[in-house]
Image: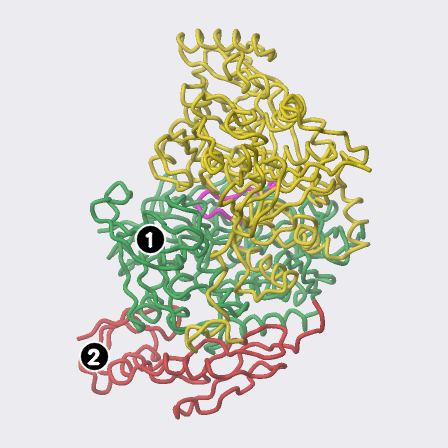
Amino acid sequence: MADLVCVICPGGCRLSAGDAIGGRGVAGARCPRGMEFARSEMGAPSRVFTGTVRVSGGALPVVPVRTNKPIGRGLLSECSRVLAGLTVSAPVGTGQVLLPDVLGTGADVIATCSVEAARRGC
Amino acid sequence: MQPRKPSIVVVGGGVTGAAIARELTRYRVSVTVVEREDDLARGASGACGGVIHSGFDPAPGTLKASLNVIGNSLYPKLADELGFAYRRTGTLILAFDPDGVTRLEEIRGRAARNGVELETWTRDRVIALEPNANPGVLQAVFAPSAGAVFPPEVVLALARSAALNGARFELETEVTGIAVNRGAVAGVETTRGFIPADIVVNAAGVDAAAVAAAAGDHTFSVRPRKGQQVILDKRYGSIVARHIMTLPTRMGKGIGVAPTVGGNIHLGSTAEDGVEPHDVTTTSAGLDWIFENAKKLVPCIERDWMIASFAGVRAISDTDDFIVRESPAVERLFNVAGIQSPGLSAAPAIASHLVGVMVKAGVPLEPEPGFRAFLDPPIVTSRMSTSEWARLVAGDPSFGRIVCRCEGVTEGEIVRAIEGPLGARSIEGVKRRTRAGMGRCQGGFCGPRVAAILSRRLGVPLWKVRRRGAGSELGVGPAKCCLRGGVGAR
Amino acid sequence: MRRSRADVVVIGAGPAGLAAASAAREVGARRVVVLERDERAGGILPQCVHTGFGLRRYGRDLAGPEYAGLELARALKSGAEVRLDCCALRLEPGGGVRRPNAVVAVSPAGLEEIRAPSVVLAMGCRERPAGSLGIPGSRVAGVMTAGTAQRLINIAGIMPGRKAVVLGSGDVGLIVARRLALEGATVAGVFEAVAWAGGLPRNVSQCLCDFGIPLFLGHTVAEVHGRARLEGVTVCEVGRDMRPVRSTAREIACDTLLLSVGLIPENELSREAGVPISPATGGPLVDECGASLTPGVYACGNAVYVHDFVDDVTTEGEIAGAAAARFALGESGDRRRDGCKMFFREGRNVRFVSPAFVRLGRGRAWPSLALRSRRPAANVTPVFRWEGGQCSGPDLEFVNPGETIRLNLPVEVRGLIESDTRRDVTVEVSLESQ
């Protein structure tokens, strides 16, 4: 048995997962995604990575980013370290892929906001 | 040929040092103020309630009593010349028992000897005019001449006026020694080099005895007395209209509930002996004491109303009176020490009194005909009429961009505070000059925006912008610095 | 000063204000102006780079900036004017369609007064700052609210510190703890004075547990140390009197203390305008459409009460914006405004109920109530009491002060609303443990 809090949506269902095989014995989920979450959590937990990437020549020094699908939970910190080495040039558009297939996960790192090129002066 | 102007170094950039520097620029002298911190009014002057006391309290016959009363009378004109906010609030002292009523009688006697006008108020009058005062009051006395200022604003205005008249200000400059030659001062040793001087004025506050000792003068001592204080949200700024206080005690003026010129309420202060000279920490016991006692005066006060708490350390001399005299040990060293409360109230009078002391000691002080008493009025959009403000924005749009929501401070005001003479170098410096960040959110929203303006104007990376002095940088490095190793690799 | 007229003025271009403006335009308001004092729209969302937004409304797991972008695009497409860098200075209530409200605002373009029959208050909320806590010790750099740190990291692009302690377990604190950990800083722990976390359980799980950040319940920061910058804090257990127990004190070296000790609806403008404010929420007393007790003045979003999900803020913003537009267009008669009301009052274990009241009228969809408990409890029955009657709602397995509870009004309470009552009714809502 394991007690989990579903992190799929802000609803935060408290799940009890029994036998992990096939996600049977999952209690407390108010939607099918919760069942799926519990199954994945018992096997290979995954999360969407969110953070920032440095921008050169932009109106802002960083651009917010996320992966376009969940990656292994254990890879979150490694993903952040990889992105620390990345600098992109302004302008950046929302949804723009800044790093494809991060850490071989198949997930792309995309911008979640646009950053215009810096105006001259201030 | 004109004789060389005497050079005077003033040690300490509190209200005493700033008032003295300005007063001295009325004469043909060269004045340099040295201050250890990165801004003026960083000691006791900047950490007090801003009440301009009437002068009923100090013992008759002391320097404190006479300079307090004179200083109080100088404030309205000074506020007019320098453009700082000043409001006459009056002080109301409440007595809750027959013993207290007897002590009010003593206060009336003392006030009469100090030349301070006092009114006696009945309980009904107190309740009618201050409906939030504790209804248990039996009788009160009212000193109409008391007022309120924002202390850093006063100190900065005095300093700007002094600078306008030629005084130099050396900030982040700590005195490490006083050079004495044949029994007279020759200059001050500082962390930024030697500054020759014909005259040294020691206005070093809680460190005044140490500065005198550096010159070989051990004729007085100064001990620190800590005062913790609290500021309440503006929403409750009208719970009292006057500065209300308990009967003074031997340790100090008793606790007060004071309306500030910024529209807040100030509570304080404690009076704690036996502390370290620079101990400005607050304690839970101190804050408990403040609220417990403030509620005795104004019972509706709630702890939830607090938006800030802080402490200042006042300098108490061994005579308990102000010391304003030439050193008996070293010629041309003038000690201005033990300037505890009511030092802010007395400062303008201390400065003119010191000039008298200097003249008596034979210092040649020729009037400077070019002295300009008036400063250009500050631009404070929150104090302007709509049409005045509209005209200002039409000329410079940055005065239409509000940066601090709580206090209504615009970008234009912040830029002026940074770029003007004795400009702000830190977020705290901007706050003291413009009130940005002094409101209920305490800079939560505007702090990063103020920092960005400082970063642009001072040409330093954002993370290096200081909150206050050295070592108080906003961050530890640019984005990703903790992942990439090293700082500032930008 | 420039003067103009509009149907609806919205104060604040966060998710609530943008939704209100879009909805107002969509139901037919002609000129809708949104005043935003920041230099960008979206309220707090642009700095919320984490995901979890939009699942209910868009069925997508979006980051804050993405959600803000969608809502801004929708408002602009609807034809609302969104004015940035424009700070509303005051609201002067007028009293109705014929005597419109006036809003005075300032921007780099100058001062202006906009008269409008309807005004929507959507100023959001702010964090409780360090100064209000009065933590003993020095006043040093490195002590800030979690939201300020979030802005510094995610927008200003600087690192506030290398080793942090978080006081308070509100959602912002939990989310920023994770951000700091991902950016390579150490988070020594989250310290919460009460026996339960202030934030959502999912945030405790994915922000703290995922990163091995310990949560210390029943603990507080008793003192801060340092000269110029924070050098450490003293943490203590909290006694029954909610004060630190000194014998349990221990020191933690850190250069940053983040505070996540509560969010407060931002209502200075409302207060100064005389809009009645609920002591329970800190926001205007509003009905199920967001109408306050001041004619023509509506409120929505976190300015009313602090919401868990932005999706709900958007939905309520739309309701308020549409109602404000109908009022401006004269479609909602004065009858309703003057009619009788049912007020909801906080009872046992209820910190607040929203809306504060519903208007008794015909043909309206009965609202659900949003409420928060004061304490966690299991197997709870919502009980509704009024003069001469009571009823209960379906049991709740557990309640948690960190999560908003949504209750549908039981049929008995609806009946009370529909009955031929000629006076105001007050219903007390309690959460009772069996």
Task: Look at the image and name its color scheme.
Answer: by chain
Is C189 positioned to the left or the right of C413 in the image?
A: left
Residue at 22% x, 71% y is: A3
Q: Is residue C274 above or below residue B437?
A: above
> Depth check: B185 or C268 in front?
B185
> Circle 2 sits on which residue?
A25
Circles 1, 2 touching at the beta carbon (< 8 Å): no
Q: Report the front residue among A107 and A31.
A: A107
List the residue tagged with mark 1.
Answer: C233
Q: Is residue B301 above or below residue A88?
A: above
Chain A colour in the picture: red
| Residue C246, percent from left and from top | 24, 44
Specify the colour of chain C.
Answer: green
- Image colour for chain B is yellow
Which portion, as a residue range, is magenta? C272-288
Q: Is residue B273 left or right of residue B246?
A: left
Q: Position of residue B87 (x, y in %)?
A: 65, 28
